[in-house]
Image (tube, helix red, strand yellow):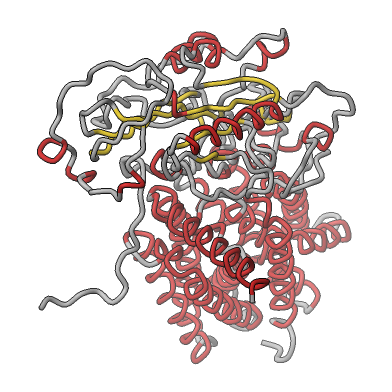
Amino acid sequence: MRERAMVPEPEFESYYGKQIIKTPTWKTPDVPIYLFVGGMAGASALLAEGAARSGRPGLEGVARGAAAGGAVVGTVALIHDLGRPERFLNMLRVLKVTSPLSVGSFILAPFAGLSVAAFASHVSGRVPRIGRLAGLGAAAFGPPLTTYTAALLCNTAVPAWHEGHQEMPFLFAGSGATAAGGLAMVLTPAAENGPARRMAIAGAGLELAAAQRLKHRLGMVAEPYEIGRPGLLMRTARAMTAASAVVSLVAGRNRAVSVVAGTSYVAASLITRFGVFEAGLTSARDPKYTVIPQRERLERRRAEREHEDARPAR
Amino acid sequence: MSNSLHGRLDDVQQDAGYDQHPPRMGFFTDTSVCIGCKACEVACKEWNDVPEDGMSLSGMSYDNTQALGASTWRHVAFVEKPLHPTTTDLGLPGMGAPGWDSHENGPASAAVTLPASEDQGAESGDSGVRWLMSSDVCKHCTHAACLDVCPTGSLFRTEYGTVVVQPDICNGCGYCVPACPYGVIDVRKEDGRAFKCTLCYDRLKTGDTPACAKACPTESIQYGELDELRARADKRVDELHEKGLDVARLYGRDPEDGVGGDGAFFLLLDEPEVYGLPPDPVVTTRDLGSIWAHVGAAAGALLAIGAASFVGRRR
């Protein structure tokens, strides 16, 4: 007798195997890059504010540069992704809480202005008080900038994204922290990079825990994060993040080690964003991720109804 | 300002800010009388000046249109399944069909023997093939995800309760595309903006019937006040059940479903996914509160990580 799989692939019907929801038209690499730089910039603004308060000018300069640079690159990537880039200002035409992209535009716009102002003031030494105030503002907008992008992906009908909405914001917060911490580890002298190292380690822990929970809670809907190209990207990023965390925990004060671990953190964060993005595309393209969970939901409701109906008879 | 994000909503226009408005208008597509003529597809293209959407042979029965999209606002699906003939009179004029031994020539994937109770599609005589034809269209949801996520306000709710894109405002961000639980709206590549069925907003303004419904020769596509259409659909389904066609069911009719009911709903003769429709669609913004709560908590966690990174040792 031949061996049979313990859990058979659930059967489902489809229309000639065609996908039901549309594949997101967001472009690669524009959107994954935006997710990455947005997260890096947001967490860097926090790092910069801490550095300014604790008297670490070297770290402050690097983090302010990362926040401002990330905001500029992110804005360009976002505008480039539009079908009608010349109409990018229409993003600020209304404010809608039901649209994370609308809310995000109202986070990104002030963040970009404030972080660029803070960086310019820090570099030029002009209007230091206004510069510090702008930095504080950027630090306030930083965390929401880092995590709102999770809402951007999750507030869609794409199963792998939508169903992961409890974990994705934490995954993105962790990923942003590792990117910001990692970049500062590479560019800051060892005497000042302790906070960057600690931020990256904590971020790695948060990111890995969130990814683990997402995988277990979602079941078959999380499959796109495990298989094919997105699966490879996610596994690679996970291994790099974990290795960087271990190395920086053990020997992070060594300058050379710090540079290597920091680079690996940053690369892993970028790869994670590509992995999450592409897993969503896979999830949209295969009708089984749309049909099977919805079928199960219907069956569950039917069973509950029957259970309800059966009760008064007893 | 729209307030309600999910659940039953009896006055969708008022919820969208119209104090005085005409009744909610919609489509009832009775697929049991669809003959697959595609007049709706053609009429829609003609009236709305929708560009060509690819000329190719798909191999999917007579369906070379394949799916709804930016340049396809009506799509006729063709499902063919071999079966044992048990003819049900649907009240349509019939004619002899060519003999076709489904067990030898039928598509391999569909060579499944269905239980007798399922053998109830619109059958073509004694050919042994069950034909399902259905003209799909934008559902004009009560809770429309495309409209909710549109950051520019380009998508809006009309006074008729329908959902329409304003092309002069759309900046092609594409958010509506993955938001739609039915996969209706899409971005037209060469143009950059998103397009979908408008339920012929311009024709409605002058009291006309939308082009597809006007062109439909069998009244498979019925246009009218949504309340009236729902009553008519209920009657039609009862009628079919009485005739023994117990596979007939309404799709998108229930105001309590995941999108609060569709403005364009259907009578189907099989499970929705057989026609390429999601079996239990839910508007993504139903979970908006939870999404923002988690985003906020995660931002708080990041802030805590940032603060904690500076606590303790000097280096």
For residue B125, above or below residue B294? above
| Front residue (pair B202, A48) | B202
Residue B81 image offset from top left, x and y in percent: 27, 38
Q: Residue at image x 23%, y 30%?
A: B59
Q: Residue at x 50, y 46 (%)?
A: A30
Number of residue marks:
0
Viewer-closest of A179 and B272: B272
On the image, the x and y values in percent for residue B54 come to 35, 22
Is any part of residue A173 visible from this angle? no
Location of residue A103 with respect to A39 vertically, above or below? above
If the image is split into quadrants, where does the C terminus of chain A sit?
bottom right
| Residue under the point 80% across and 40% down | B2
The one nearer the camera, B283 or B236, is B236
Give x and y (percent) for residue A135. 79, 61
Q: Is residue B180 visible?
A: yes
For the N terminus of chain A, the quadrant is bottom left
**In the shown orientation, is residue A237 left or right of residue B15?**
left
Q: Position of B215 compared to B52: left or right?
A: right
A52 versus A290 height, above or below: below
Front one among A53 and B136? B136
**Quarter-of-image position of residue A88:** top right
Q: Quadrant of residue B287?
A: bottom right
The location of residue B232, given as percent across then percent down, is 62, 28
